[in-house]
Amino acid sequence: MNLYEKPGAESLGESVLHSLQRKIISGELKSGDWLPPEREMAEQMGISRGSLHQAILALEYQGFVSIIPRKGTVVCDYRKHPTPQSLAVLMSYSSAELDKSIFIDMMDYRIWMERECARLACTNIYDSTLLEMGTIASSLCGVEVDVVELIFRFHYLLTQASGNSIFSMIFRGFEPAVRSLTQQSFQTMGTDLKETAQLMKELVHCIEIKDEAAAETTVVRLLSHGIDQLKSRYI
C-alpha cells in the first residue's frame, strides 16, 4: 500500500498540503511520527521535491509538523500546542474522518456551547427566530428536504438566538466539519430523523416557555442523539 499517494485534481501544491493535513487530523499520522525523507515521499506521490517541500513548510507554519535539521520532519501535537493557523485548518476541515481525541474534544465543546446558547435563548431569542426553528423542526421529515442544510440552519439559529455573536461566529466557522459530520450521522449511519425532529420541537417549546433548565437538558439530548452514533465508529 502506498501511504503517500499521488495527489488528485486540485492544484498540485494545495492537493499535497490537504493530503498531509488529512492524514494528521484523521489520526493516520500521529504526534511523534516521522515523515519519510522528502525524496522518498516525492517519488511515491509523483511530484517534484520542491512542491513537496513547500507543502511541508506550510504544515510547519500551521503547527502540524516540525522540521528538525539533519533529522527530518516529525508530526507535532497540535492539540497541546495549537496555533491560530492550526485552528483555522480545523475549522475549514470538511471530512468526517477525525482522530478520536479531536472528535471527542470538538463534540464536548459543541455540547457546552449549545447548552449555553439554549439557556441564553430563553431570554434573548427573537420571535422570528423561534418561528423559523419551529418550522424547520416540523418540516425535517418531509419529502425531498435537504436534511443536512435544515439541521445546520437550526443549530446556527440557536447560536444566534443566544445573543452572543462569538458563539454564532465560532459555530459558523466550523461549518464544513459540522456539515460533514451531520451528513455521515444521518445519511450513512442512519441516525433516527423522526426522533431528531421531535427533540427539536421539544427544544423550541422549552425556549418558548423560557424554561432554561429544560432547554439545556433537551439540547444535550438532541446533540447526543447524533454524537453517540458517530462515536460508534471508534469502538
Image (cartoon, grey):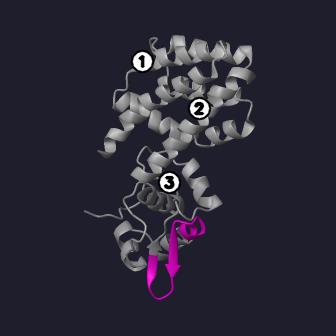
Say which quadrant the C terminus sits in.
top left
Q: Secondary structure at mark 1?
A: helix
Q: Amino acid at mark 2?
A: Arg
Question: Residue 169, image x and y in percent?
Answer: 69, 40
Task: Give, as a three-letter code, the residue at label 3.
Answer: Glu
The residue mark sitting in front, 3 or 2, is 2
The three-letter code of the residue at mark 1 reads: Glu
Disc 2 target residue: 115
The relative height of residue 123 versus residue 7 in the rendered view (above or below) is above
Label 3 or label 2, whichever comes before in sequence order = 3
In the rendered structure, are the residues bearing label 3 and label 1 in contact, judged by CB atoms less than 8 Å apart?
no
Pick whichever, 179 or 87, lies toward us. Answer: 87
State the SS at label 3. Answer: loop
Q: In this figure, which residue is indicated by the disc labeled 1?
A: 195
Tell me the element at label 2: helix
The reply, left or right, for residue 182 in relation to residue 161 is left
**What x and y, as percent, mark residue 153?**
59, 26
Q: Is residue 99 visible?
A: no
- Give the residue drawn at x 74%, y 30%: 163
The label shown at residue 10 is 3
> Which is more foreground, mark 1 or mark 2?
2
Residue 191 place in picture, x, y as percent = 37, 26
Q: Would you call the spot at circle 2 few (<14 residues within 10 Å), some (14-19), or many (20 or more)?
A: many
